[in-house]
């Protein structure tokens, strides 16, 4: 699984110091802050974290899909050099679907139940490529073929409820890739599917994006997905990035206790029968505010006194093995790495 | 709003067996479920009979409408009852009861349909504007609708009749206007609900234009309750027509047979000839029941949670 990582190419997407604040009736809630990452063309980047870690909010902010009245987005999101946060709503809508597309978690609800799938694929082609209805129909049939739905032409007339979950996700992938976007964000695209289908869908995604130069941002809580697909991983906790590393070093030597906990809680085939899994104690609800502590401290096995009184900063790690590999860590007392090497 | 087919195990990415019902639309699915419900069939049968009778009134009625040629047979004490010539007897003016009832159906259908179409088109347009644009438009439209809602429909009918005179048109306008708020709120409400759904977010993520999202995605998913309400509104309208006539606010033309006015005429003879009131009363009740049954069945058939 070697893929040329465009180390030297300019980033397609650069997110810098992103903060998202929701204005609720009970005051403001900071859902995401200090999030920075970048994605180059052809690169596959993962945002990993539990529910509520802010990974989906980050994706919606990049897409410009957060409700403008009840949210404030600060920081910088540059796409191909242009600052997205300076664009008006109309220009951002023009980018969506054409330049950047998103695949959502639940294929059961992400398709309109009363509109035939052919119309739903066709409308994005009509919108961005200026195709006429009949032309769009032609292309839609081909697209269904490309995502592995046989007899695509005939199936254009079908309604979402006539398709299984896996088929619907294939349709959604076809819609997202219809206009060949340069950036694809996949928000837990396999979570709502059966395990066997998950593998098929991931394989399909890999086939479709590799070699095309499409930049992929994969949002997931499943490190198995990361292992098979991504080059660069950003682990998020309670709205902030706690560790960024290339996939190999993240899996080989996790530095943040949370990353370690996530890896430790994966069931392994080679573990002894009956051996209990090692979950991370507590739940994300136990998080402390980042303002004067580490949010993960209450659940952390490596906690030191400092963790509950001071905010750890995100520091670049000095032993980045290759130039261009972003490595960063937000921890006072990281896990030991094999220093001997 | 999960429309997942519960009976269908999401098989391994295979084409599902349902696929041979290629392209089943919302309405076709609803029709399939409608046929399975006995209440729906009963309601539909009543509605069908009513509509056929109303449309074919001149063919079905044994005599000319409002012909009082048998007035001589009516005495202050009694009205001639059923006889071979007059299957349901005469009414208090000496017209054939059956003929009057049949033409009354026609009148109810005309007024019911016109007023409902009026209420539906104005109300749905307001609701569409409010639900589609949101924000300030929504606030203004909905306050307007609230004002309208605060006026009792009878008062509205009196005012309309006072302004444009007592006629069939004023009855239609009064009943139609009274229905506007219901349709406006209903459509706006379901559009607001649908706007929050995942497929709208997904369409937004594809850069689909706002107008297209509203008209092509939100509106088709929001129409179910409105269609149902239109059916139920027909039932209400038929009762309201009768009520307005009963109160003397209906169509002023005595030559037009109307169930409500037949009730009024029967009032003074109720002691001797209760059947004069029973016939039109039963007609009103059965017709309203038919539309209500049909509407309720339609509501269930269009409910996405029932979709199989």
Image (tube, grey):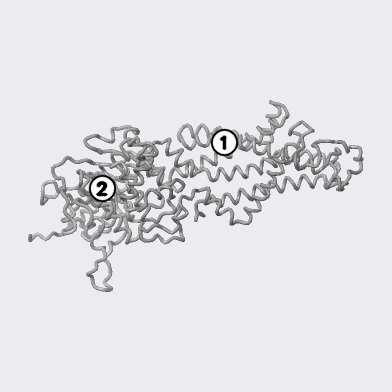
Q: Is residue A261 left or right of residue B16?
A: left
- Badge 1 vs badge 2, beta-carbon distance below 8 Å: no
Badge 1: residue crowd in 10 Å (few <14, some 14–19, many ≥20): many
Residue A26 location (% of width, % of height): 40, 44
Residue B19 location (% of width, % of height): 44, 55
Residues flagged by tags 1 and 2 on a common chain: no
Q: Quadrant of residue A263?
A: bottom left
Q: Is residue A189 left or right of residue B152?
A: left
Protein chain holding label 2: A
Protein chain holding label 1: B
Identify the secondary structure beneath mark 2.
strand
Q: Is residue A215 left or right of residue B307?
A: left
| Alpha carbon separation for disc pair 1 and 2 | 45 Å
Answer above or below: position of A114 versus B261: below
Q: Is residue A333 visible?
A: no
Q: Is residue B91 visible?
A: yes
- Name the one closer to the observer, A187 or B216: B216
Query: Which residue does the numbered mark 1 point to in the structure image?
Result: B123
Query: Which residue does the numbered mark 2 point to in the structure image?
Result: A217
Which residue appears at 68% of the width and 40% of the height? B109
Residue B171 location (% of width, % of height): 69, 33
Residue A315 location (% of width, % of height): 16, 48
């Amino acid at each position: 699984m070697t893929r040329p990582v465009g180390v030297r190419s300019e980033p397609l997407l650069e997110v810098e110091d992103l903060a998202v604040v929701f204005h609720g009736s009970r005051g403001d809630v900071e859902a995401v802050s200090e999030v920075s990452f970048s994605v180059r063309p052809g690169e596959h980047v993962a945002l990993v974290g539990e529910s509520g870690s802010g990974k989906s909010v980050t994706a919606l902010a990049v897409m410009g899909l957060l409700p403008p009245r009840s949210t404030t987005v600060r920081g910088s999101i540059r796409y191909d050099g242009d600052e997205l946060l300076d664009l008006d709503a109309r220009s951002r809508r023009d980018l969506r679907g054409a330049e950047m597309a998103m695949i959502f978690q639940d294929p059961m609800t992400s398709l309109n139940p009363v509109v035939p799938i052919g119309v739903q694929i066709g409308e994005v082609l009509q919108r961005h490529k200026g195709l006429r209805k009949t032309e769009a129909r032609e292309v839609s049939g081909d697209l269904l073929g490309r995502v592995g739905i046989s007899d695509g032409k005939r199936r254009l007339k079908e309604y979402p409820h006539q398709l299984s979950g896996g088929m619907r996700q294939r349709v959604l992938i076809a819609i997202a890739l219809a206009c060949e976007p340069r950036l694809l964000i996949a928000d837990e695209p396999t979570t709502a599917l059966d395990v066997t289908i998950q593998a098929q869908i991931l394989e399909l995604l890999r086939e479709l994006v590799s070699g095309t130069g499409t930049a992929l941002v994969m949002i997931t809580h499943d490190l198995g997905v990361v292992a098979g697909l991504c080059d660069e991983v950003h682990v998020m906790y309670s709205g902030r990035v706690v560790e960024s590393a290339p996939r190999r070093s993240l899996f080989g030597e996790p530095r943040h206790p949370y990353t370690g906990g996530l890896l430790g809680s994966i069931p392994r085939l080679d573990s002894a029968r009956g051996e209990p899994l090692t979950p991370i104690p507590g739940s994300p609800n136990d998080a402390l505010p980042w303002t004067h502590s580490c949010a993960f401290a209450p659940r952390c096995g490596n906690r030191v006194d400092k963790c509950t009184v001071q905010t750890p900063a995100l520091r670049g790690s000095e032993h980045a093995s290759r130039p261009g590999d972003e490595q960063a860590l937000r921890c006072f007392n990281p896990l030991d790495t094999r220093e001997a090497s | 709003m999960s429309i997942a087919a519960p009976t269908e195990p999401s098989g391994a990415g295979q084409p599902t067996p349902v696929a041979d019902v290629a392209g089943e639309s919302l309405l076709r699915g609803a029709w399939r479920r409608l046929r399975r419900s006995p209440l729906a069939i009963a309601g539909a049968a009543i509605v069908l009979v009513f509509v056929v009778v109303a449309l074919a009134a001149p063919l079905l009625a044994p005599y000319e409408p409002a012909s009082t040629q048998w007035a001589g047979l009516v005495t202050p004490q009694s009205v001639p009852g059923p006889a071979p010539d007059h299957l349901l007897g005469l009414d208090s003016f000496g017209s054939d009861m059956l003929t009057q009832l049949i033409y009354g159906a026609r009148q109810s259908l005309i007024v019911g349909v016109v007023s409902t179409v009026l209420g539906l088109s104005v109300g749905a347009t307001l609701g569409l504007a409010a639900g589609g644009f949101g924000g300030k438009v929504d606030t203004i439209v909905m306050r307007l609708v609230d004002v309208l809602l605060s006026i009792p429909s009878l008062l509205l009918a009196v005012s309309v009749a006072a302004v444009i005179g007592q006629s069939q048109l004023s009855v239609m306008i009064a009943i139609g206007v009274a229905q506007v708020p219901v349709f406006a709120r209903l459509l706006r409400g379901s559009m607001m609900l649908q706007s929050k759904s995942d497929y709208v977010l997904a369409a937004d993520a594809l850069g689909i234009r706002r107008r297209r999202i509203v008209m092509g995605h939100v509106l088709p998913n929001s129409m179910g309750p409105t269609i149902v309400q239109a059916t139920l509104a027909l039932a209400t309208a038929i009762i309201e027509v009768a009520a307005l006539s009963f109160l003397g606010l209906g169509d002023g033309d005595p030559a037009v047979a109307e169930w409500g006015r037949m009730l009024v005429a029967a009032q003074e003879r109720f002691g001797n000839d209760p059947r004069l009131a029973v016939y039109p009363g039963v007609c009103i009740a059965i017709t309203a029941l038919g539309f209500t049954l049909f509407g309720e069945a339609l509501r269930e058939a269009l409910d996405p949670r029932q979709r199989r």
